[in-house]
Image (tube, rainbow, N blue to C red):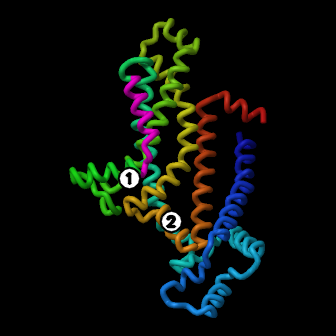
Amino acid sequence: MSRYLARRLVMFVPVLLGVTLVTFLVLHLIPGNPARILLFGTNPTAAQVRQLTDELGLNRPLPVQYGVYLTDLVRGNLGQSYSTDSPVVSDIAQRLPSTMALAGAGMAVATLVGVPLGVLAGLRPGSLLDRLATSASVVGMAVPYFWLAFLLILLFAVKLGWLPSLGTGSPQAIVLPALALGLGFSAILTRLMRASLVEVYAQPYIELARSLGLSRRAVLWRHALRNAVLPVVVVLGIEFGTMVSGAVVIEQIFSRPGLGSFIVTAISNKDIPAVQGSVLVVAVFYLVVNLAVDMLHGVLDPRVRRAWQRR
């Protein structure tokens, strides 16, 4: 297991290197001069634009700029934001907790709604409850989360006045964003949990457990659910990145000062250090969460642990 973990950690290096390279190239292909954007509104002269471009180091060849960026990155320096004139690390540190809280709340909503519905549907395939859960999951996957966000605001904030729709001023402010982010993903979990449970109940060891006189509840908790939940655990880790990327849009809709809104503002201002640092941090979190899910999968499934040992 330790060798497998070491190999996975080593693989982080080329993946993150690829992320930095793609982000760097895309940002430099976007039209617009960051220096001109920063001086917008001051009627800058061509000389002022050239001077600021030189100060930002944007007049150097792209390979040189990328090499300087990697050198600073190895030293733990993500650069200085053009817009805030603060270290990118401190800007991200201020906003990251809000984004992680929203992604975690969305994941909690998806899990608490999707898994129980999938279990109930999988226990009685073809029943009315199964058809209702399946239909609801189809609708949930078809509805875009940003459209759902507007519907939730219209119903619970505007019409009923139960929950706030903007900002982070109270604990209730995260409810609507979490619902908008998590309900769509809960539909995926419902279908996955239902299909996995139906497949597990068709296995011979379930019939053996029933023949030994175990109750329906004992069969579910001791045998069926433990094996059926494995694909769900894997998908939860994979979709964590989707939650974080979805938070970019949700934070804009609900005016939450998180990493997503920071990235959107940085892109519009062509704040290259801020965008590069933010994308890199999101990539690191995505890789770490997926590695943690793989480790948890090995803990839950002995077959995975044996596969690690053979590698």
Q: What's the residue type where badge 1 is placed?
A: Pro
Residue at 55% in and 68% down? 267
Mark 2: few/some/many CA within 10 Å (<14, 14-19, 20+): some
Residue at 59% in and 38% down? 296
Tag 1 or tag 2, which sits nearer the N-term? 1
Residue 16 versus residue 141 in the image, above or below: below
Q: In which quarter of the image is residue 125?
A: top left
Q: In which quarter of the image is the C terminus?
A: top right
Q: Quadrant of the N terminus?
A: top right
Answer with left or right where residue 193 lies relative to residue 203: left
Part of the protein shown in magenta? 130-146
Q: Nearer the viewer, mark 2 or mark 1?
A: 2
Residue 110 versus residue 262 in the image, above or below: above
Magenta span has 142? yes
Q: Mark 1 points at which residue?
A: 177
Looking at the picture, how far across and down is residue 290, in whole percent? 61, 45
Residue 264: mark in rendering: 2
